[in-house]
Amino acid sequence: MNLIKRIFRSFHPSQIPTERGDRIWVAWGETSSGEIVSEEAALRYSAVFSCIRVLAESIAQLPLKVYERFGDDSRQVAKDFYLYPLLSLQPNAYTTAFHFWEFMGMSMAAWGNAYALIDRSYDGRVFALRQLRPDRVFIRKTSAGKIVYDVTDDQGRPGTYLFDEILHIPGMGFDGIQGYSPIRLAAETIGLGISATKYAGGFFKNGATPGGVLEHPGKLSEDSAKRLRKNWSDIYGRVDNAHKTAILEEGMKFHAMSINPEDAQLIETRKMNRTEICGIFRIPPHMIGDLDKATFCLPADVEVLSETGPKSIANIKAGEKVWSWDGNTMVLAKVKKSVCSGVDEILTIRTTTRTLRANKAHRVLALRKTKALKTRCGCCQRVRWMCEYVPAGELKVGDTIVTFNSLLPSYGGEQCPTRKVSEGLMEFCGLLLGDGPVSRRAGVTLAKAGKAIYMDYCRNVMREESRSFDKSENGRTGAGLAAFAVYLEGVDRQTGGPSLMTAEELEKLGFSGDARTKKVPGWVFGLASTYRLAFLRGCLDSCGSVDKRGRISYYSVNRERLSQIRHLCMTVGVPVTNLCERRITTHLPNDSRFDGMIYEFTCPDPGANKRIRSHDEKYRCRVNEGQLFSRKGRKYPRYGGVNRGSTECGLARISEISIDLPEPVYDLEVAELHTFVANGVIVHNSNIEHQGIEFVKFTLSPWLKRIEQSLNVRLMSEKEQKRYFAEFKVDGLMRGDVKSRNEAHSLAIRNGWKSINEVRKEENLPPIVGGDRHFLQMQMVPVESGGQGGESSSGKRNQNNV
């Protein structure tokens, strides 16, 4: 370091004058962490690079339009204006608009200034914009007070340009001429992150173990010590050498140092630093992949009710349909995103009928008290209960949450993958799920205890199926379940049919496997409620029981299958309890002994159980004689229910809340409604869409406004500025969900400040005849009629519906 630099640093320790070309410029100095931070160095730090990339690519993807103004304050896209193709398509012969604005956005975000050389024709019109590296542009004032730009090209040749020859878009700054570099202002924070990253890299390079000391009983020369240090590092100083056995000679000993990354809180420091850098650039942390603080997440074992039955949230993919609550009824909605959101602490929320596991931020639909209202006499107060989505961490024992109870009775069809179904066929499939192995070599067998009395009914049902079965559906004679009925053979504890075509069809329907692997096929959940009840009837006769109070219990060694049966009960409006497990010892129909874990749940309402019924006379009598289950009706009437006209949702009181260890959590984003059913509870999904809207409003908008104003002032003449202006179109990022847009459109049309065709244009729909008129509220008559009637007949109005 020469004398001038030493003197300069004594007065400005954070800045070092550095020779660059033929001038002296000021670079960042060493930060408190020991790192020298520059824009180039900061871009190599992942958090900074991610934030700048989000900003740059977000700006580049937005359509940049040039509009023409009119006297009535209206406007239209000026595609014939010479600047339109320059700004929207190709600024110069070598660069597309996307790459140009991506570079300009990166320059503003990192250096605080973006520059482009303006090429003008002989008449002063701009015909090209060539981007300039911001680290090669320097602003200065001449002795006459004019601003000029000194630019060094790629060959190192300097040049000077006047103010009107450079498109300069400055960021935030004091003088309004030059913007400050965010990286320079945040050098300490960025330096800390770079230092922590380097430390982590060195730690793993050293075999993920802290440093240590080699103790030698004698005295080593300087050369010997250097050689020993080098040999030790070469052999044991990398991750792939971490588990090699060290060989110490001449009585040497190794003493490991006690400091480790956990004591130094390395992980917490790096996480906190990423969050601070997101705050500097005003970027939501989830947009750069920082999902440790992500909200609205559920662990992997939570089951989401999809179109084809319950599925682990970890296995739900984008594009699948799940059941969603729209405030009045259950509807199918498509999943837009499904991601693992990191690791978080889990709460287990239990009621007598539901168990939900979620992190503290996940929102659950619950009944909450609203502000108390006084009665007319003023002597007492009334409490109003409202449904709202509450973070799980705010729920307490005794609170009431909203549960999924049933689907609309009108939902479902009557077609399976191979044929049109019947109640008898679905009863047989339910029996087969519990007691029937399927094999293409051995055919189909139903096994049951000797006291079972429904086998005769099953045989009769299958004979009826054989007579009503249309052979042309399978395209061959004697195919499918019809053949099963023909070849029936029965003994006391076993009924079977040797038809291989029957087994082939049943495999197509999804009933192959053994007791531990068979599942409820997804198509069963899409059938009408009559056929779902018939399937549950068969499951009851094969793997269930009814006690003397009329309560039905289902059992299985397969937890996943039993959970599917439980959710199937919910879809038809049969109340269920939580799943439980217990160890049992019993004899199976084939006389083998079973000793292991079994899972079960109960349907405790005999009134609802009558819809399932049974072909076992004893079970049927118990269900019919059971007492009606009305406990919940007495427990919740003062709350008013969720929706007095709907039976699709119910209520459950929280009996216990416990805290579990952190584990990976997953997040869904459901289109439009943003709700889904998790373990039988109505919950709200991620707010990624709303965070995206806030990102546009509070992060992108200031940057876009700077660009727009710079373009209007620097590229257009005063005369052109009065007629034309450039503007980014952000409507696509601000659209919101369908429900919100529909409400906004309806309000705009009713109040007369948008026409139907304007709304249709925003929704990418073609215009309609008469849709350019504006209407007054209430009567919905044309504005020009002034509420006097005119062409406001119902026929004219109906013509203009959206």
Image: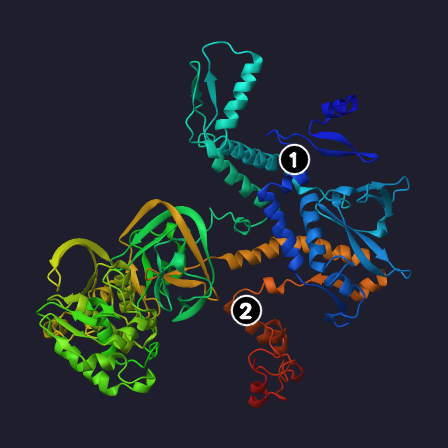
Q: Which residue is mark 1?
A: 37
Tell me, yes or no, if residue 605 can be seen here: no
Closest to the observer, 416 or 788 = 416
- Of the 4 image quadrants, the one containing the N terminus is top right
**Can you give x and y, in whole percent of width and height, for residue 440 in the image?**
26, 71
Q: SS class of the residue under badge 2?
A: helix
Give the amino acid type for the residue marked by disc 1 in the picture. Answer: Val
Give percent across and percent down for residue 659. Answer: 33, 46
Q: CA distance from mark 1 to mark 2?
A: 46 Å
The residue located at (72%, 53%) in the rendering is 706
| Amino acid type, callout 2 | Arg
For residue 741, the mark is 2
Count of picture labels: 2
Using a 10 Å C-alpha cutoff, classify the residue at mark 1 as few (fewer than 14 neighbours), some (14 to 19) or many (20 or more): many
> Eyeballing the image, is 646 above or below 651?
below
Q: Please tell me which residue is depicted at 56% across the width and 34% down the height of the picture.
A: 198
Residue placed furthest toward the top: 218
* 248 lies above or below 349: above
Residue 348 placement, left or right of 283? left
Label 2 neighbourhood size at 10 Å, few (<14), some (14-19), many (20+)? some
Q: Is residue 549 left or right of residue 695?
A: left
Side of 390 where 26 appears, left or right: right
Q: Position of residue 423 (x, y in %)?
A: 24, 79
Please report whichever mark, 1 or 2, sits nearer to the chain's N-terminal start.
Answer: 1
Residue 122 is drawn in which quadrant? bottom right
Q: In what element is the residue under mark 1?
A: loop
